[in-house]
Image (cartoon, rainbow, N blue to C red):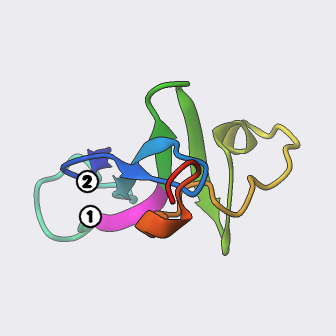
Amino acid sequence: MRITDDAPKQDAQGGAFYTFAIDARHGVDWMDEGEKNPWLEATITGCVYPATGAIFVKSGAQHRPAAFMLGKKVKPAEAQVCTEAKPTQVAGVR
């Protein structure tokens, strides 16, 4: 897993989050360091909110709580989750 931000981003509700990417490598020779099965970058992406520990994974055009990766039935996250707000959109900023 790679954290893809140097500093946290802020969503429209003022929540600070970091985005991440998980790379994958599949195949019988996945432990072979050769180029037969190269790494696929950003196979899974999402974000984490360090203040709460909430983790969201991108699924199509939406983000869902990471529990859906374990087969849990969860609703999509609100639209602002994992979406960087413009400075004028952040809650409490005028």
**55 over 82 or under it: above or below:** above
Looking at the rendered structure, the kind of residue marked 2 is Asp
* Count of numbered badges drawn on the protein: 2
Quadrant, the N terminus: top left
Bin the neighbour count of mark 1 within 10 Å (Cα to Cα): few under 14, some 14-19, many 20 and up.
few
The circle drawn on residue 51 is none
In the picture shown, does residue 85 fall above or below 6?
below
| Residue that badge 2 annotates | 5
Q: Quadrant of residue 58?
A: bottom right
Which type of secondary structure does the marked residue at label 2 adopt? loop
Residue identifier under label 1: 39
Judge whether residue 41 is colored magenta. Answer: yes
Q: Nearer the viewer, residue 3 or 70?
A: 3
Q: Where does the image place residue 36, in percent across and percent down from the top left?
A: 21, 70
Q: Which residues are magenta?
A: 39-45
Q: Residue at 86%, 50% (x, y): give it.
A: 75
Residue drawn at x 48%, y 25% is 51
Q: Is residue 65 magenta?
A: no
Residue 37 position within the rendered picture, expressed as x and y whole percent measured from the top left = 27, 67
Q: Is residue 37 left or right of residue 20?
A: left
Q: Quadrant of residue 70?
A: top right
Query: Residue lying farthest left?
Result: 34
The Cα atoms of the two marked residues, 2 and 1, are separated by 21 Å
Which residue corresponds to the image point at 37% horizontal and 55% vertical from the top-left?
21
Q: Is residue 1 above or below residue 54?
A: below
- Examine the residues drawn in magenta and state their main secondary structure: strand
Which of disc 1 and disc 2 is earlier in sequence? 2
Measuring from the top left, give residue 14's x and y in whole percent.
Answer: 52, 46
- The residue under the point 23% across, 47% down is 7
